[in-house]
Image (cartoon, coloured by chain):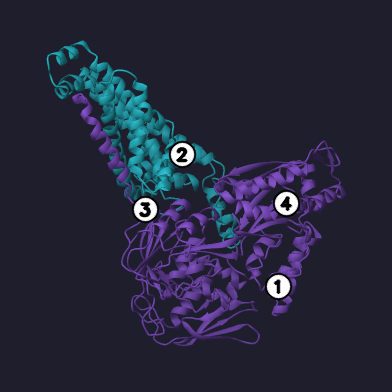
Chain colours: A cyan, B purple
Amino acid sequence: MRLSLNILMRAARALLLVVFAASGTILMVRCAPGYFSDAREMDGLYGQVAQMEMQTKRKTEDSIRETIAKTFQSWARGDFGQSRQYQTPVAGLMASRIPVSVRLLSEGLAFGWLLAISAALPISALRGNHVLWGAPFTLLLSIPTAAMATACIVANAGGPVMVLALVIAARDFKFLRHLLDEAWSASHLLLGRAQGISPPRLFARHILPNIAPRLRALATLSLVTALGALLPVEVIFTVPGVGQLAWSAVMNRDLPVLAAVSVLMAAAVAAAEWMASQSALVEAG
Amino acid sequence: MSSRFRSIPAFLLLCSALCASGQFASQSAPRQPGELAWAIHYDPGTFDPAKVDDQASELVRYLTGGVLVRVNRLTNKPEPQLADSYRISEQGRLLVFHLRPGLRFSDGTELTSADVAWSLRRVLAPDTQSVVAEEFLSPAAVVVDTPDKLTVRVHLPRRIPGVEAIFDEIAIEPANRPSQGRVTAGPFTVAEYKSGQFLRLRRNPWYWRRDAASAPLPYASSIRLDILNNREQEAANFLRGEYDLIDALAPEYFAVVARREPQATRDLGASLNTEQLWFNQSPASPLPQYEKAWFRNRGFRVAISEAIHRVDLARIAYDGHATPAFDFISPANQQWHNNNLKYPPENPALAQQTLAASGFHRSGGRLYDSAGHAVRFSILTNAGNGARQKMASLIQQDLARAGIEVTIVQLDFPALIERLMHKQDYEACLLGVSNAEPDPSSMMNMWLSSSPNHQWNPSQKTPATPWEAEIDRQMRLQASSASQRERKLAIDRVQQIVADQQPFIYLVYPNVLQAVSPRLSGVDRAILSPGPIWKIDSIRRAQGRSQAGGQ
């Protein structure tokens, strides 16, 4: 009973998060300077057409409250609206781009975690100066994602997966190393090692089950990190995913696309958080 | 090494694998055999040739649309295309086009005068809202008829100077079957489009033109236009051999490309485009009255023009790939440029004298107006244009020497347009104007005082100053006069008024910078849009791997 109530509460919280994200996005885009502008207005040839289009838009979208209400109503009907810049249904635009971003995220997360674990495992066992061994990751942390991606383009090396993996590894490495440090220094593990049990066996049988809940929480954080890095990575490497679409929507004040992207992102974060907390609850229950 | 250290080689291996994973989901589709590829910076707004209202759509119309006449981008003279000949009556009110026999659309159906008449009427119809229709001045009064299968007559209510060039912008479509560029009479047809990613155009197998050896044109099997608004990536893709050309190469990447592919790059000299600074003279602007008074003061504007070192702007901001500008018509536009123009010279000492004569004075290194207000203003410009940002900084330095404090405000385009066009909430603005057409009639919207694009004081009910009234008069005269000499005199007069009054302070003409792969043959580089691809049907790409990689 308590578990069901907990699940319900968390589902409601996730839904609220999505609603707030959508409303906030609509409000910000609608109030952003230049919402009723079109770059063609400056064009001597096409300026008048663009100005007429903007006047019509201003008439139909004058009230912010109505815009929010209309957006939610059309979503309730399963209609994500029409993209302002592409003049095509948002659902169609998103459908072709979501698989690209999901693939990039999955590969980035997988490689990022592999990198972080491969580095954290040996370093956690080192005696002495961990700071020195962890320095490359600390350095990576200080480099903005966009700078890393631009450096790759300039050097004509690496790619979006590598940048995403490095961003994730840099952020997760420290947590992982900390977790493993703690785990290896537990007295029962010291005893196990003294008895000659192999480290892989100790890791699989004793460490992993102990740190699993915290790893799941870290996975949620990784997803949030990856989602944040997705936009610059896709834009700079021109990956035709949701991040690139979002950037172009920001630059063109494409409200329907931005609202849909923010709902998608919020839903992804909420779902990840919900799954992590559910598994923790199930374990606790 | 402890067993736990065994993961170090695995870690290193992983790093190498990641470094090698350069290519993920590429923006574009793979290149097909015989395909040309380059980048456009925005998605075309429409593929309907009659409804083109942006530059990307204009390019697609150029590549796909069959037209009656095509303006030669080197000579600027119209040449027959689908029409094998045409004539204009003496009064200039009747055009008669004779079509080539045996013309066909890309789906194999016959192209007759009925299709031409239908396409022209569609463009002229008010429901279509075609931008081209406005060029006929009174589109509703234009009558099209077809005395036979191969003849089309266009009756105009009055003479329109250079009317034949308008037909360069009207693509002929199959009557009653508008197809969004999928059935055309031009060299290519729209085949595949992924918004925000790429557009693929396929060769029209029924295209009418043949080369000297009677081989069918176009040579290219298809064209892939990647939608890519990243100049750095565009240059990198060109160097990798993924793109065949870059039409408007940004000056900051010209040297990068030229270093690797010197034979590919070319600086064709001054373009028709201008970069200019102007002050807000709109009475509706929320600026303080004393600032409005500065900006309406001719002496103030002339002094600013005299204080700016244009050579430095061209040398530093454009890496030498720009030409100092003093006029709205570039010297590249030889037909219309006023060679006898008198303009304020670059001279900081003279600028001080002009300011003093206009009621300003210096005190402690700062400039003040007669009421004691320190002269300071902001220059608004768009973010993301490196050359423009550098120019703004250089102007800031030049004006600091005159005692004027300048701040630079960079906004993204939508926000900038709101400040500029809707709220008129700015002091000075630094932007450029792209002039695709050499004929000054295409600049009417900018110069008529009633136009919303008359930037320094838009949408005036009556001209605010006598010189603006004179510009209006001269521009209307050149747009309606049958005499070429009279038109030239009118435009020369407008150029002189603008040079005297400095409503726009012209800074530079950015040079035309193009990069064309040495593997392309048949390219005839032109300054006029669409630049190197204006003879697209004659461009051929050699097969094999290029020096920098690629296919």
Above or below, A236 relative to B518:
above
> Can you tell which quarter of the image residue B338 is in?
bottom right
* SS for callout 1: helix
Crowding at mark 4 (Cα within 10 Å: few <14, some 14-19, many 20+): many
In the rendered image, residues at marks 1 and 4 fall on the same chain? yes
Vertical comparison of A126 with B393: above or below? above
Which amino acid, by three-letter code, is at mark 3?
Gln
Tell me the residue that label 1 is attached to: B478
Q: Subunit of mark 1?
A: B
Residue named by callout 4: B308
Q: CA distance from mark 2 to mark 1?
A: 50 Å
Query: What residue type is disc 1 on?
Result: Gln
Q: Are marks 4 and 2 on the same chain?
A: no
Q: Which residue is depicted at the point 48% across and 83% down?
A: B83
- Judged from this view, the residue extending furthest toward the front is B1
Which residue matches tag 3? B27
**For residue B54, above or below residue A253:** below
Q: Amino acid at mark 2?
A: Ile
Locate residue B436, reporting x and y percent.
57, 66
Side of A103 relative to B157 (left or right): left
In the picture, the quarter occupied by the N terminus of chain B is: top left
**Subunit under mark 2:** A
Q: Identify the mark at residue A68; answer none if there is no mark.
A: 2
CA distance separating discs 3 and 1: 47 Å
Front residue (pair B213, B314): B314
- Could you tell me which quadrant the C terminus of chain B lies in? bottom left
Chain ID at mark 4 = B
Q: Give the distance between the C-alpha atoms of the residues marked 4 and 2, in whole angstroms.
A: 49 Å
On screen, residue A27 versus residue A127, left or right, reads right
Compute the Cα span from label 3 to label 2.
33 Å
Q: Nearer the viewer, mark 1 or mark 4?
A: 4
Q: Secondary structure at mark 2?
A: helix
